[in-house]
Image: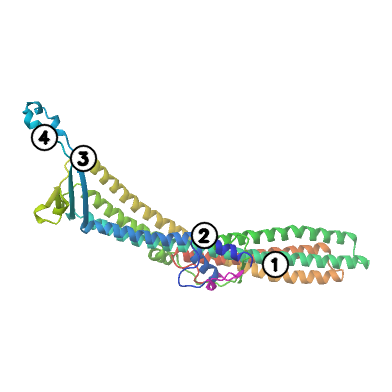
Amino acid sequence: MRYVYPLVLFQLLIGIGVPSGRAATDLPERPELNLAEALNLAMERNPQVLMARARIDALKGKIREVRAQALPSINLNGSALRWRDPSFLNASSFDKIPEEFKQALVVAPANLFDYNISVSQPLYTSGKVGTALRLASLESKGTGVDREQVEQQVRLAVIRAFYGLLLTQQQLKVAQETVHQREKHLEMARTRFAGGVATQVDVLRSEVSVANARPELIRAENSVRQARAVLNNLLVRPLVFPTQAVGQLTFTPQPKMDLQEAVQRASEHRPELVRARINELEAADQQKLANAESRLRLDFNGQYGVSSRLTSNLFNHEFSRYIFTVSVELPLFDGGRRSGLVRQAIANRRIAELTRVDTENNVRLEAQTALDEIERAEKTVEAAQLSVHEAERVLDMMQDNYKYGAATTLDVLDAQTALTTARGTLLQGLYDHTLAQAQLRYVMGLNPMDGN
């Protein structure tokens, strides 16, 4: 457990630590993890998931900002000014002023104090504020869908990585068992050679067989390390953390599903399709906003306060000052800027529609591929299960026959190789079938974890 403390320090540094409301002991830091625990860790730690959730908080602030456009803006303003203005000394007719008056004209600095409350309120915007609020609401839904999409993608990635580690662990056991079987046969060949009932060729062949099996064992060990690193990366663990996948690759045939049913479920639940439809609605509102740029706008602005040269008069109502205006704006000509915005909005709306159609076609293809992969994997597993059973029987027979001289070393080695190949094919088929089921649920927009 020497990697636990660096991991906790890493979490504190990047600020993701333990989520509020949960104790640190609730997060299993033991090496052994089942699939549910791995998924929970990923949902709590994976940066992609945390960023998607943070975007929702950022959007809440954006919605509040947009909503403020429809509400009055009230400000308290104040200023203190001191100035000296000799402009009348520079007047063109100053030289015509009698000298005795010039002596009385002295430029003296003066003060001006001012405080006021200002109010501004849009009265009519041709629907711009209302449309902006609808856009913010749509984007809020879209961001929630984006978060769901990221979580689904991370779940699927964790399922792939978890079963990938489980597969390599099982393949490592097969490689270890293969080496053990060939070592046992080597001992048998040496014993028979010592007893004079086997040739030296049998011993040499057995030694070569053991030597050939060891690189496969090393390759299997390396595959486990690589698969473990992939899973650890998704779980925000050190890459060398000794994570062990706990579980079994099992075969559970599922009822056949029609392509149309899969596509229908995807249309209802798949985040990408939901997001594409939201984008269409947003594009329509963006077009409304662009059209509103050329329409009438009314705004109210008001200001009330006190302005005086002397601070003693700042609370004297005789020095009060106010101004109230209602401004009307109707754009007439801007060189084509607004028409350019409208054209862009129309094109973006068309792009959103085409993107939705393209996404639907891609999802339909993904659904067909997933269904085909499930069928292929099922047939592969069924055939491999039979092959493993027959290969085990053949190996037992060859080993027994070899003891009594009725089989050669080549016969035993061929049987061992056939069993190893059959077991490898079965494991790969079980892995493919499990992932194909998870992929189909992902394609339909359902939790890939369900059914595993």
Tag 3 near tag 4, CB within 8 Å: no
Residue 13's tag is 2
Q: Is residue 71 visible?
A: yes
Outermost residue toward the top in this view: 95
Q: Helix, strand or loop at disc 3?
A: loop
Residue highlighted by disc 3: 334
In this rendering, position of residue 150 left or right of residue 61: right
Q: Mark 1 and mark 3: span between their CA atoms? A: 75 Å
Identify the colour scheme used: rainbow
Of marks 1 and 3, which one's residue comes earlier in the chain?
1
**Do the numbered discs 2 and 1 sit on residues whose CB atoms are within 8 Å?**
no
Question: Which residue is located at x 34 percent, y 52 percent?
Answer: 352
User: Mark 1 and 3 residues: CB-CB less than 8 Å, in contact?
Assistant: no
Residue on which the image places disc 1:
173
Which residue appears at 56% of the width and 60% of the height?
233
**What element does badge 4 sit on?**
loop
For marks 2 and 1 on the same chain, the one whose residue lies earlier in the sequence: 2
Position in image of residue 22 (x %, y %) = 48, 72
Mark found first going from the N terminus, 4 or 2:
2
- Whether residue 336 sits left or right of residue 214 in the image: it is left
Q: Where is residue 139, by image quadrant?
A: bottom left
- Label 1 sits on a secondary structure element that is helix
On residue 105, which mark appears?
A: 4
Say which of marks 4 and 2 sits in front: 4
Q: Which residues are magenta?
A: 24-35
Q: Amino acid at mark 4?
A: Leu
Distance from label 4 to label 1 (Cα)? 107 Å
Q: Amino acid at mark 3?
A: Asp
Within 10 Å of the Cα at label 3, are there few (<14), some (14-19), or many (20+) other Cα atoms? Answer: few
Q: Nearer the viewer, mark 1 or mark 3?
A: 3
Q: Earlier in the sequence, mark 2 or mark 3?
A: 2
Q: What amino acid type should be assigned to the residue bearing mark 2?
A: Leu
